[in-house]
Image: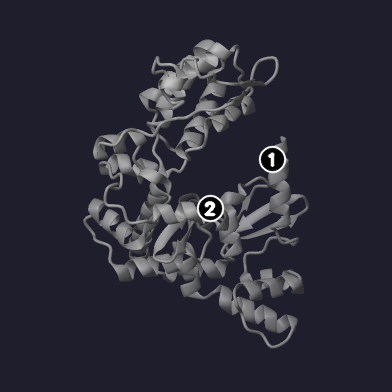
Amino acid sequence: MDYFEKELEKLNVLNAFEAKPASGLKEILESIQTKELMKIAAELKVNYDSVDRKLLINADFEEIQNMKRIENALMLTRSKELDLFTELLGTGYIQDNILLRGNTGYLQDSYIVFSFYDEGKIYFLIPEEIKQIYKQIDYPQFLKKYNRFKQIDQYLNICITLYGAVKKQKFIEIFNRYNDEKLGNKEFTSALDNLFLRQQPFYEFEDAIVCDYFSDDNMDELEFLLEDNDDIPFFMPPKERFLKFEDDLYYEMTPQLQRLRDYIIRNMCRDEEDVSELIDDIELVCSLEEPFQSILDEFERHKIFFNSQAQVYEIAPLIYDVSNNVRTWTNRGHTHFEISQITGEPVPEWVPGPVKVPMKNNSKILKINRNDLCPCGSGKKYKRCCGQ
């Protein structure tokens, strides 16, 4: 068992009841400690008058079986969680010490799936009472609601990935542009109320939905994104392309990124996997519009070093091209180059200064003299180009 599996097993043990697995809910509750019964009552907001074990068992027993609670909890499950739930419906239990917590945690926290640690083994199961209640749910109607709910969630995640923040009315407009079944204010508000019953990578801020990247430290960035600016339209490509951004790690491998990748493989590092990881991080740093030094820091973090000062001058124009052709929140999902084409304004100038370059022997401070060729690749001297 490797390190990851050992840590996963420890986590699963920590979140399991130390008891023999039981299929009946009442039997399960009777087998666990009073402090665990109190924890269930607190998390499910069960009212109880005193710390009486029998009263706690009965109160928890009733609330865990609440059909509306179960239906609402299942509405918030993600695809792999729902797959696990469906698998457990058709079996007595799953014995697996290293079942991914990411697939089980929400269902366990919702007291729909229970886990037990007994004689070195971990068991996962759904109590029979919950299985019976699930059978009473109108499944076709539930599935219809579930798919619609997931569709709204999907589009929220795409908008957060592409734009960082979006006003609620704009989100409804974007959603309705891509879908025949239109979304209204009432349905959207209800969906948000349900979504926020579970932790999300976004939150409500005034009349907008914003990425959880934003906090008190960078509210000025958020306010800039939410300013009304008719000169910068939202990037809304054809639907098939738009939907790819549901994955927050997805980005388009542009010709500029490919050229940078080819240069690094040809001149700095032959390991294609290491270079691909570096390119992933450079794309992210550029999308966040970080300074040139941050990009050089990524080279050092990945232990890919420069051979000479001349190599920095060779690669700088490639990085500059990448930065102008990645999607940014400040451009509402467009690239700097696309916005230049839309508005007629030039792309932002890159003004490099002294930077710390990760060299093979040791890091070196590279100072750009006024009479040097400009690193942007224009062919002009620095003092006649970006140095102005």
Q: Do we see residue 8 in this rendering?
A: yes
Residue at horizontal 72 percent and vertical 62 percent from the top: 17
Q: Position of residue 306 (x, y in %)?
A: 59, 16
Q: Residue furthest right?
A: 119
- Look at discs 1 and 2 and give the one toward the viewer: 2
Q: Residue 199 at what x, y percent from top left?
A: 53, 60
Cβ–Cβ under 8 Å for marks 1 and 2: no
Place of residue 241 in the rendered image (x, y in percent of width and height, measured from the top left): 31, 39
Q: Is residue 82 visible?
A: no
Type of residue at label 2? Answer: Asn
Residue assigned mark 2: 218
Depth check: give the residue in front, 228 or 162.
228
Q: Is residue 360 shown above or below 90?
A: above
Tell me the crowding category of disc 2: few under 14, some 14 to 19, or many 20 or more residues within 10 angstroms, Cα based: few
- Of the numbered discs in the image, which one, if any, rests on residue 5? 1
In which quadrant will I find the N terminus?
top right
Front-most of residues 177 and 360 = 360
Residue 111: name its quadrant.
bottom right
Q: What SS does tag 2 mark?
A: helix
Residue at horizontal 35 percent and vertical 36 percent from the top: 335
**Percent of width and height locating residue 271:** 56, 17
Residue at 55 percent of width and 55 percent of height: 91
